[in-house]
Image (tube, helix red, strand yellow):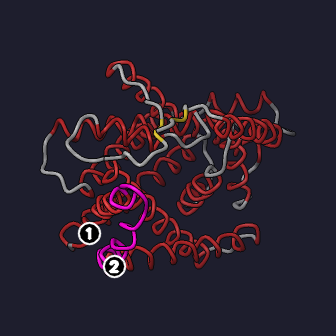
């Protein structure tokens, strides 16, 4: 079966588009900003609050890793959790440095080489993770739109995002209620495909559905939902303490709003390292709370260092010490 290299034509196109968008975002973010004033704000930042923000980031990654372990229905083994934690750092490092969203692939391959589970099961659990995050952000955005008077550039796309979150919630419920039944109904049809394709597709779907099995029991649902809420809270706290570090006078809801804007706005292709796009989105989000652009950009620069750099450094460390590399992507269906 043919294989595609990581840096195929589509990936290169995404990098080029992301770089162009990043350069444009850098220009928009730094336009009309005094470099001297920017440096003055950064030099006055409270170092203790900065370190506290880094602590929240590291604790959040540990929380996300623990949630992934819960969704995989594994018996507790410290070495397995360490493998999952390393995979999460590795994945976040790839997603930050490259615009092709290779982080999820990196997580799957890294963890599958270290714990006894299939790639399709890991894929199913990651799909569940993304859907749960989408629902959580949708609920948070609904709360913000209901509680605050936000500009139209927020509420109009925000309503669309909330609808997508609702659709995702209904899709999860449908998969939990009817997923196995639908698989049994479609298996005879899949077996009519040429060769062994039908059996392989059915096997992949069966293992992918196991990624949702953790949501079939309330004993597993409660920890997953609690860890999701904890992760959202830690991310918001990170944003808030960095605001306090540069003396931005804004409510706690502003930190949550910045989080949502950064998450949604960073989804399309961006420059390697999210340079420019991250900073522009931070400035844009704080403009809804009438924060001065110089101060908002200083916040974006500091938040970039606090929220992203530890993940990159630890992710690089995982690659070096594990001597791991992302393999070629198989375009076939051999994801057992």
Q: Which residue is mark 2?
A: 185
Q: Is residue 182 magenta?
A: yes
Looking at this rendering, what residue extends furthest in the right direction?
32
Q: Position of residue 248 (x, y in %)?
A: 63, 49
Q: Position of residue 61 (x, y in %)?
A: 37, 43
Q: Work out whether residue 8 or residue 36 is closer to the camera in this orientation and state it.
A: 8
**Image x and y of residue 329, in percent:** 48, 37
139 to the left or right of 264: left
Q: Classify mark 2: helix, strand or loop.
A: helix
183 shown above or below 231: below
Which mark lies nearer to you, 2 or 1?
Answer: 2
Q: Quadrant of residue 8?
A: top right
Q: Please name the residue shown 55% across and 55% down the image.
A: 259
Residue at (63, 27) in percent of width and height: 43
Q: Which residue bears the numbered disc 1? A: 221
SS assignment for the magenta stretch, majority: helix
Residue closer to the observer: 256 or 136: 136
Residue 256 inside the magenta-drawn segment:
no
x and y percentages locating residue 334 in the rendered image: 37, 45
Magenta span: 177-200
């Amino acid at each position: 079966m043919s294989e595609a290299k990581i840096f195929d034509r589509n990936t290169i196109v995404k990098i080029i588009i992301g770089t162009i968008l990043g350069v444009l975002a850098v220009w928009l973010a730094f336009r009309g900003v005094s470099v001297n004033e920017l440096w003055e704000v950064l030099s006055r930042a409270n170092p203790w609050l900065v370190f506290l923000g880094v602590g929240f980031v590291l604790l959040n990654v540990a929380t996300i890793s623990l949630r992934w372990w819960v969704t995989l229905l594994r018996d507790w083994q410290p070495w397995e959790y360490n493998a999952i934690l390393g995979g999460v750092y590795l994945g976040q490092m790839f997603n930050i440095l490259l615009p092709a969203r290779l982080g999820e692939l990196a997580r799957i391959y890294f963890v599958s080489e270290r714990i006894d589970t299939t790639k399709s099961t890991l894929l199913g659990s990651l799909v569940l993770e993304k859907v749960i995050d989408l629902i959580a952000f949708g609920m948070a955005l609904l709360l913000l739109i209901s509680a605050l008077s936000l500009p139209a550039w927020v509420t109009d796309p925000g309503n669309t995002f909330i609808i997508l979150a609702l659709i995702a919630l209904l899709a999860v419920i449908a998969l939990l209620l009817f997923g196995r039944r639908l698989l049994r109904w479609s298996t005879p049809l899949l077996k009519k495909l040429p060769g062994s394709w039908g059996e392989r597709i059915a096997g992949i779907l069966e293992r992918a559905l196991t990624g949702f099995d953790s949501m079939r029991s309330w004993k597993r649902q409660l920890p997953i939902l609690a860890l999701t809420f904890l992760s959202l809270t830690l991310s918001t706290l990170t944003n808030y303490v960095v605001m306090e570090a540069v003396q931005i006078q804004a409510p706690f809801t502003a930190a949550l709003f910045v989080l949502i804007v950064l998450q949604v706005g960073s989804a399309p292709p961006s420059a390697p390292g999210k340079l420019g796009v991250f900073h522009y989105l931070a400035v844009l989000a704080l403009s809804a709370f009438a924060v001065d652009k110089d101060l908002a950009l200083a916040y974006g620069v500091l938040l970039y260092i606090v929220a992203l750099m530890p993940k990159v450094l630890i992710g690089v460390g995982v690659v070096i010490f594990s001597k791991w590399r992302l393999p070629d992507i198989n375009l076939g269906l051999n994801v057992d």
